[in-house]
Image (cartoon, helix red, strand yellow):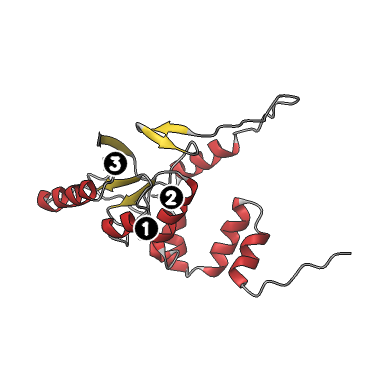
Amino acid sequence: MKFKKFDFNASRRRLSAALTIEDLYKIAKRRTPKAAFDYTDGAAEGELSLNRARQAFQDVEFNPSILRRITSVDMSSDIMGGPSSLPFAIGPTGFTRLMHTEGEIAGASAAGAAGIPFTLSTLGTTSIEDVQAVNPHGRNWFQLYVMKDREISYALTERAAAAGFDTLFFTVDTPVAGRGCGISATASLFRRS
């Protein structure tokens, strides 16, 4: 019989016991204030698109290849004209500090450590420059909501470019604000060379 050393860090204990996304969801629901959780968890109106997206992920099946050589597995990929260690990126999330005190700093740090792109939202809670400072060698992207006052949008774009962000996502799903939270549909506007 082998006893496990007790971990006095409650967060680390909870997270190490989480084996699935559903486990993390349950932890977040218990630990997060209701308004912040509902903002993050919710979607617009009847949540039809959210439910379809969840079903699409549930429909993905793992089909292992048996008795094949796997001595060199390369998960790296080219995303939006640049390298990524894994075939995905961290997408834009507004008001991130509602869910975590470090907000985008934690996300950008994690993305940098994993070698994947990080996207800062216009509605982020951390400045463009602070994200660049915490992930100086990583790929940082910026998602832009165009403001009625175009000078604000231009200034944000110029700051992102000056900080070395290499991709701008131009949000096109909010000509009129929806009733509830939704996932942003974005289109690539430009790539810096």
**Is 171 left, or right, of 30 in this rendering?**
left
Q: Which mark is residue 147?
A: none
**Towards the viewer: 62 or 116:** 116
Residue beneath disc 2: 112
Which amino acid type is shown beneath numbered disc 1? Val
Q: State how far apart marks 2 and 1 are (Cα).
A: 8 Å
| Nearest to N terminus: mark 3 or mark 1 | 1
Q: State how far apart marks 3 and 1 are (Cα).
A: 16 Å
Residue beneath disc 3: 166
Residue at the far bottom in the pictured view? 8
Name which residue lies at 47% across and 68% down.
Answer: 34
| Nearest to N terminus: mark 2 or mark 3 | 2
Q: State how far apart marks 2 and 3 are (Cα).
A: 14 Å
Which amino acid type is shown beneath numbered disc 2? Gly
Disc 1, SS: helix
Residue beneath disc 1: 134
Labels 2 & 1 near each other (Cβ < 8 A): yes
